[in-house]
Structures are given as C-alpha cells and as structure tokens.
Amino acid sequence: MADLTTNFIGITSPNPFWLASAPPTDKEYNVRRAFEAGWGGVVWKTLGEAGPPVVNVNGPRYGAIYGADRRLLGLNNIELITDRPLEVNLKEMRRVKRDWPDRALIASLMVPVNEDAWREILQRVEDTGCDGVELNFGCPHGMSERGMGSAVGQVPEYVGQVAYWCKKHSNLPVIVKLTPNITDIRKPAQAAKEGGADAVSLINTINSITSVDLDLFAPEPTIDGQGAHGGYCGPAVKPIALNMVAEIARDPATAGLPISGIGGVTTWRDAAEFMALGAGNVQVCTAAMTYGFKIVQEMISGLSQYMDDKGFTSVDQLVGRAVPNVVNWKDLNLNYVTKAKINQDDCINCGRCYAACEDTSHQAIAMSEDRVFTVKDDECVACNLCVNVCPIEGCITMERMAAGMVDPRTGEVVREEYANWTTHPNNPGRCAAE
Amino acid sequence: MRDRQLAPGIVAGRIDAAALQGNFTDLHPPLDDHEALVAADRCYFCHDAPCITACPTSIDIPLFIRQIATGTPEAAAKTILSQNILGGMCARVCPTETLCEEACVREAAEGQPVLIGRLQRYATDRLMDKGVHPFRRAAPTGRRVAVVGAGPAGLACAHRLAMKGHDVTLYDGRAKPGGLNEFGIAAYKSTDSFAAREVDWLMQIGGITLATGQRLGREIVLDQLRQDHDAVFLGIGLGGVNALGLAGEDREGMRDAVDFISELRQADDLSRLPVGRDVVVIGGGMTAVDAAVQAKLLGALNVTLVYRRGRDRMNASRYEQDLAASKGVRIVTNATPIAVHGNGAVREVEFEYSDDDLRPTGERFRLAADQVFKAIGQTLEGADLPALDGRKIAVSDRGRTSLPGVWAGGDCAAGGDDLTVTAVAEGRDAAEDIHATLMAEG
C-alpha cells in the first residue's frame, strides 16, 4: 500500500485528506471522532475575535439540491464562523493537538482588517500548538456584510496586506483561503503570495440560492418567510474548483505556490484530480456532512490503490502532474479528429444519444426502424454530447481517426502534425506557419 | 384448522378468516410517495420509448413518470388516462412483464425494468383518490350511440364518445357494469371494489346512460339498436365457455373457471365460499392461473394446473406461472384430459401425456379431484352478429364490422390479444372512428 504521508508547507499528516474549516470541525468532540476515523488533518472551524461570539440563525441553515435517488449534489449554508467563545475553542484545540500529534491541526481565523486584531488572535492561537493558520477570506454570507470573509478576499490588496501582517506577527505557516466569488481567481492568489503567504486554499463556497419555496415564495433555507444567499459547496461545485486550482497552478506568477484543494471532494478520485491539477492536499466538508467521517477510509484505500497501480511511491509524484496539460483553447490540436462510436453490444437502445444529437446538436446519429443507433461519420463533429447523455458508461466512445484517413464530414485528409488556431488560415491574426 | 383443510369434498372455511384476508390483499401493494420517487428516478426518458410502443394503448410512459418524479402525479394520471381511461385497472392487471416492462431499456441493461405498472397505479390512484375527473364533455352533438357490453372495451368506447359530446346508452347483460374487470379478474389484483369505483369515476364524464340487465339477444336485439341509434358498438366479450368434450363432464364438482372466479369476486364473505380439497384446473391461460391461485388461497390442500402443451406455450405469462408456483400450485404440462372418473361427483381426472403437437404418448396418470375447473377458452355467443373471422367478429383496424353503423372491439372482435388493455385500445379507437363517421355525415 502506497505511503500517503503528506508534507504540505512543512506540515506533515499521515494522508492528504483534511477536513475543511466548517461545521464538522467546530468542536473537540467532532475533531476527535474525525481523527479516530482516520482523517489526516483538520482545519478548525473559523475563530473570531475574543469577546461575545457571533450568533447563528435559529431556523434552518442548510439548503440542498439533489440528483437521482435524492443523492445530495449541492449544499448551501448560511452558518457563520464559530459561535462558541474563543477561549473554549483554543482550550479544545490544545487538548486535541496534544493527543494527536501526528495529525495536522490548523486554526482558521477571521478578524477585522486591522493589524492589531490579527496580531492579537495569532498570539493566542500559537499557544495551542497548532501547525498553521488559514485566513478565512472566503465566507460569502453574513461575515462579508461586516467587512470580513469574502469582502476581504474580493480585494487583492487586503488579501496581501493581511497575509503580510500574519507572517510578520507569527512564525506559523500561513494559508490564505480564497473566495471563488471573484472574476479572476489568480489576482488574490498573486496578492497572497506577494504578501508572503505560504499557500492558498480554495475554493470557499459560492454565493447561491439553492431553491425557492413555491408556496412561501421565499428562498431556501427559509427563515420566517425570508432567505439570504448562502455558500454553495458539494459535488456540484467541483468543476468550478478544479478550474480555479488549475488557473493558479499554471499562472507563472503563482506557479509552485502550494495549494490546498477544496470543493466537492467526495471520493479518492476527486482528491486525486485536485492533486493532479496542483493541490498538495485536499480539504473535505460536504461529503463528510453527507455520509459521516467514515468515507475517509475509502479515500485512503482508493488513493493508495491508484498510486500503487501507477507506481507512485509518494503523493508528490501525483501533485501537479496534469498541470502542463491544462492549456488555452488556442493551443488545442485542431488536427486531432475523432468520431463517436456506439458499441452495439453495450447499447440498450434508449435513444437518448439520438434525441440529444437530433434535437440539439448535429443530426449525426441515425435511428433504424428496429432502434439500432449508429453514428453518421459525415455529420459527427465529435462534440461528445452522446457520450455524456448515454446511461451506459463506455458504450459510446470517441475514436481517433488515423492520419491519412479522410474525414467524411470535411472531406479533408487527417494530418499527422499538431496544428492549432494560431496558425489556422481562418484566423485573421494567425502567425505564419513554420 | 388442519382438520378443515383436510376435509374432503367442496367445503367452506378451510382456513380462518384472518388468513383469508391476508391471502386476498393486494398482490402488489401500492407504492408510497418515497417508493414512487425512487422508482421514477430510474426512468431514462428514452427517445421514442420502447415501452410506449409495447403498450397497446400507447401511453406516454416516460412523460408520466417524469411528471411523477417532479411531484405532479395528477398530471401524470391525466397523461395516462388520456390514452387509457381504464389506466387504473390496467396498472393492476396488465401483464407488464410481457408489455411495457419487458420493453424497458433497463430490463435490457440490468434485468430490472422501471416499475411502470406500479407507477401508473400510483399516479391514477392519486387522482382518483381526489375524486378528480380530468376530462370535460364537449357540447352535445345530438347523436345517439349504443354501446353493448360494459366491460373494458365498452367502457373505453362509451367514455370517449361521451367526451366527444355524443349521447351514449351503455348496455350490459349483468346487474353490474365492469365486465371482466368486475367479474373476471383475480380478487387480489383488484381489491377494495376497485372495478366498481373506477366505473363510477369514469361515468363522471356525463352523457352515459347505463342500462344493466340488457343482454344482446335477450332483452335487446341488434336490429332494433341500429334503428334506434346513429351507431352501435359491440363489446360483448366471450359469453360461452369451451367444453372438454369428455364423458363425465357433467359430474358434480366440474365447473367453469370463469364462474368460480366471478363468484369469488362477488362474494361478501370468502370464509363462506366453498372450495375443494383436491382441485384440478385444466387450461394454460390467465383464467386457469387465476382460478388455481385463488383456489389455493381459499385453502384447497392440493391444486394442480394441467396444460396440454409445454410451459412456453402457455398463454399465462412466465410471471403468472411463477406466481402460481410460489403460491403452491403444481403445474403439470404436456398432459391432456381423457376421462372424468367418479360416481355422481368427480373423484379423479385421468390424463395422458402428450407432446407439444398433442400426439399422445400412451403414458397415463390420474389426479384425485373433488373439484375441477375448466379453463380451456371462451367463445363468442349470440345470433345475428356481424360477419365472423374465424370464431370472432371480423373488424377493420378501426373496429368496423360487416354491418354499416356497427363497430366492435374487445375479446369479441378478431385480432389482438385478449387483454384488458387491448380491449381499451380497441374501444377507444372505435369511438374515434364512430365520431369521425358521425361528424362526416353532418
């Protein structure tokens, strides 16, 4: 079994699976259960300033969307940072870290944007023996209305400034947690790096309304007939998170900046994808909230098996492996020609590929009287929609045409060499070909 | 308890009332909301779905399942009922395993079709429980149509005609409407007087006058009906029963299966309904299975269903055969009855094994029997009917007979399977043709 020991900005943990700062990490009780279940690290629920803690709503704080069979695909929350006194949290953190020295324990922090506030909180959390701090610049609801959370994360200058203060007033590794509620994720990441942060973590939750109660005419979760936007997370946000991780990983200005990947990680496979796109570890919340802490066992066994299959002996060999293959559209090979192919042995004749292609795409699938579905190569543009809507995995595949063959759709010979838009004759701004 | 089950002859109360009640509850209990959503989630919403093609009434199954999945079972019910006004009964009695569910692509994919029949029941039950009738009668046309037979074909025809604004008189020879839905289906498929409730619900369309106790050739005759109406639809079913043609066929204890099924359906108290200890059912169709299973459920000790050809030739579906076997019915195939033995009452039936082409093998055996149900097919009865095709009324694909102004459908008409759902389709389609014909006449 592959060794999953992870060293993330000097913080070691037995595996790369951390629980994100969120409801599951709000208390000693939960965190102990998480460590007993096997989680490699925990980012404690965000701490605020000393004094009276924040309060939460007393009605529902989560909303959800579902896939088939009521599988939870997306979760939205309007919970704020910890609503327990700072002293209680610090005391518990100290006890847990003492008992679980091999696990990563990170303090998530959110205080107003002034140097004294940050210096004050940093001194207090250092005493817990925690391994690092994560600056919560991501929460999009509630705290942002008070000038914290995503209100900071949306202004790169603030991000850099606070990161700088934290490095100045503490020796702890600093992770900056980024909000996705921004046009260009690279800007706050660059600011964090310039401010001296050791790493970024992303994504925090996305502004969202999960649904509307059509009797009350109010957003859900509904509090006394009204609702506020919340933060969206879970499997539904994974594609957005993967892209943002990759954007930072391949930006020359932030290349090499350690990333903790967050956003819909539900299985070992999701984790491996984040890591391949540059994340040094992952943080999980919704999957644990949906299924409990035990899921980490599947993540550990799955990633181990995958690494063994690939011959990887360290997670470092996986991290960033896919980053070079994330390119811009203009760099894609236009001489890569594929056609959809339907395996008739696997086909169950549902006709979804036909409906999708006939109604919404390129009329490239034929349907015979006896319901045999075949691809018309002279119409197929290889859009992949048929593959995507087919209920049988692997039934429809995209087959590459070999060089020298004639593409029946265009009548042109498939070329061997790589060629992209930058040299295409239809491109008015093309570069001269070699 | 055991003593009563062992008692020879045809006696009532072989098992206690509680066991009887349990035996005759719904074969497939209705889906609750959660079960319906889980089942509906499995539908792939196929293009030009094979299940629709497999349904004799062409119900848009993917659409109604999507309507269930999105929380509008009443809309789903309207989708069903607009194609099949007896969608509630068909959801209970259709051999879905050889129709829509056999064609379901998930049967191909996983051997587990979407539960189409039970979802259809879920939707139609929801609508009917609300007492909603989702169709409105068009403005009266002043045309009068006689529909003869208030079974599935007649009811479907009458409803469609009434909806089009015609005035319908619905005749039936029995005291109650419903036909085989009321008298000819196993009790565990239509519990809580569903057939009668469905007819009441159907009649809410208005414009249908029910005339019971009016049997064709007895109280009413076709010529007079034709004179008094603008059109006539015959949905008279098959009133006669085939005989075995054996000596001793009239012995005490020998009975037509359809009579037993009918009596059982109409019984108020099953504990007072007598049944034999050793029951033999002769036949291989749904009627044979319904009789055999219900005899067993009533408490018969030994029930043997004997069919003259191989299992794969039985008209009862594999599912029905397995149902019978699961209830303890012994199925014997490739055996032809050759004699009924007894002294006054039947004591034994003698069979001879035969091959699939009914060639006798010379191997014979006897089965003890104090009650024998004959279920070897029903026949058309009646004089002065339109021209026949074989033993049934010849019809065009729109139900037209050889007589002008006379249509026919259901079991009495040639072509199509003898299924409730087929009868509904034929009654409905004939109504559409009658309507088009009457309107074209101006």
Image (spheres, coloured by chain):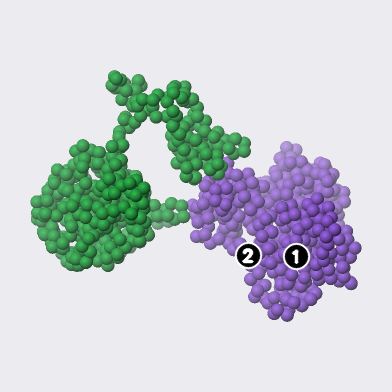
Chain colours: A green, B purple
Please report the residue visible at 18 percent of the width from the left and 42 percent of the height from the top.
A190
The residue beneath circle 1 is B304
Give me the residue at 59% from left, 63% from top.
B29
User: Quick check: B311 above or below B386?
Assistant: below
Q: Position of residue B107 (x, y in %)?
A: 58, 50
Q: Residue at x 77, y 68 (%)?
A: B279
Specify the quadrant that holds the N terminus of chain A: bottom left
On the image, numbered disc 2 is attached to which residue?
B26
The chain to which mark 1 is attached is B
Query: Going by the image, does A362 lie left or right of B252?
Result: left
From this viewpoint, is residue A21 visible? no
Q: Residues within 10 Å of mark 1 (few under 14, many from 20)?
A: many
| Quadrant assignment, res A368 | top right
Question: Which kind of residue does numbered mark 2 sit on?
Answer: Asp
Sequence-first disc among 1 and 2: 2
Q: Residue at x 46, y 55 (%)?
A: A69
Residue B312 x, y percent position in the rendering: 71, 53
The disc numbered 2 marks a residue on which chain? B
Above or below, A94 relative to B146: below
